[in-house]
Amino acid sequence: MVRGEPGVGKSALLAAAADLAGAAGLRVLRGSGSEFEADVSYSLLNQTLLPLYTEIQRLPPALRDALTVALGFGPGPAPAALLVCNAALALLTTVARKTPVVVIVDDLQWVDRPSAVVLGFIARRVAGSPVGVIAASRTGTEGLLDRRGLAEVTVEPLDTEAAAQLVDVRFPTLPARARQRLLDLAQGNPLALSELPAALDGEAGHRFEESDVDPLSNRLQTIFAARMADLPDPTRLLLLLATFEGSGDLRILRGMTDLVHLAPAERAQLVRVDDSTGRLRFRHPLIQSAIVATSAYEERRQAHLAIAAALPGDPERRTWHLVAATAGPDESVAAELEHASHRLSIRSPEQKGPPESR
């Protein structure tokens, strides 16, 4: 478990771990919790195990069917949570006999409840095996993963000397007064040290407002929102779709929009594309918050409708997006919601829970 405040560098450390593991010949499976998919059962597990789809089909029938249904790859009655846990563990340990595996999960505070149960189950049972698990979450957010028995590392802000070195490397021409104001505001937070200079309005000598007492995350979100204001409308729409869809799977996004619109966001360093997994990743969750905060109601509604249309084989997620796009009474959406509720009602207690707890 890697814990720390927003922007302290948890995602950067996970990315470095993934690079080192890949260079060492390990098989890397990555996933990330999404604030907008926290109510979608097994959405994180789907992200993480999707690259092993072929291997899932080689599992014993009971385990294969449990994962196939849980991950939305096929129809069937909802499997018991313990069966899904054992199936996922068996899958990873089987794959690891050929190539060691490391599972890396970011933004654990937003992982859906069933996926959190499976992840915790796996993490407590892989000691001594060629399977590793690294997960990161914000401090101050408990999330749904049972952390008992798991090793934890807390990532602290940079000390004064290291923070000053980072600023000098990134902004060598920053005047002394602005430099000191930046160091005072950022309090050693690497993301703040890198992004707050944008608040200088393009003038290196312009000092930060002394009255700026907003929480650090609010200041960063405002900066990200300002950077997105210059993006073309199709690019902003693509980012909104990616935010609500949650998985970042380019195959799904390609079915909703032209990926050529992604280029301006990549150039602005708001997102990056992982060529090995075919997934889009945001540099920081605050970017996603800024995207939603700066969008219009109709843009959000149309985005949810587009995602629902792109998920015909995933009825639970499809229904969730249809509900989010509905402004008033709608009999057809109500019927789909009733069907989704019925599917959830037959799941085991470990898989259920009120939306606010998830």
Image (tube, helix red, strand yellow):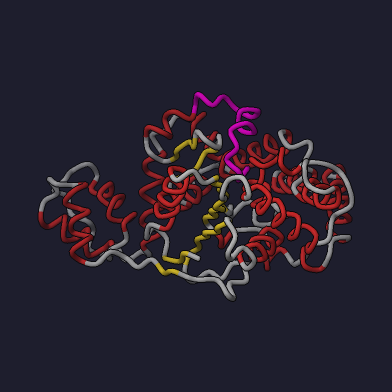
Determine the residue positioned at 58% across, 52% down: 34
Where residue 228 appears, as percent x and y from the top left, is 41, 39
Residue 164 vertical position relative to residue 170 in the rendered view, above or below: below
Q: Which residues are magenta?
A: 244-261
Image-quadrant location for residue 268: top left
Where residue 239 appears, as percent x and y from the top left, is 52, 38
**Residue at far bottom of view:** 148
Seen from the viewer's position, the closer of residues 270 and 137 is 137
Per the image, is 10 magenta?
no
Per the image, is 256 magenta?
yes
**Residue at far left of view:** 176
Determine the residue positioned at 74% across, 44% down: 56
Where residue 331 appears, as percent x and y from the top left, is 87, 45
Q: Is residue 42 left or right of residue 145?
A: right
Where residue 186 appears, as percent x and y from the top left, is 28, 61
The C terminus: image quadrant: bottom right
Q: Do we see residue 260 in this rendering? A: yes
Q: Do we see residue 329 in this rendering? A: no
Determine the residue positioned at 43% across, 45% down: 19
Q: Is residue 2 left or right of residue 207?
A: right
Q: Is residue 5 left or right of residue 296?
A: left
Seen from the viewer's position, the closer of residues 209 and 258 is 258
Seen from the viewer's position, the closer of residues 298 and 2 is 2
Image-quadrant location for residue 278: top right
Q: Is residue 47 left or right of residue 71?
A: left
Residue 110 vertical position relative to residue 15 in the rendered view, above or below: below
Residue 339 vertical position relative to residue 154 in the rendered view, above or below: above
Determine the residue positioned at 84% across, 56% down: 79
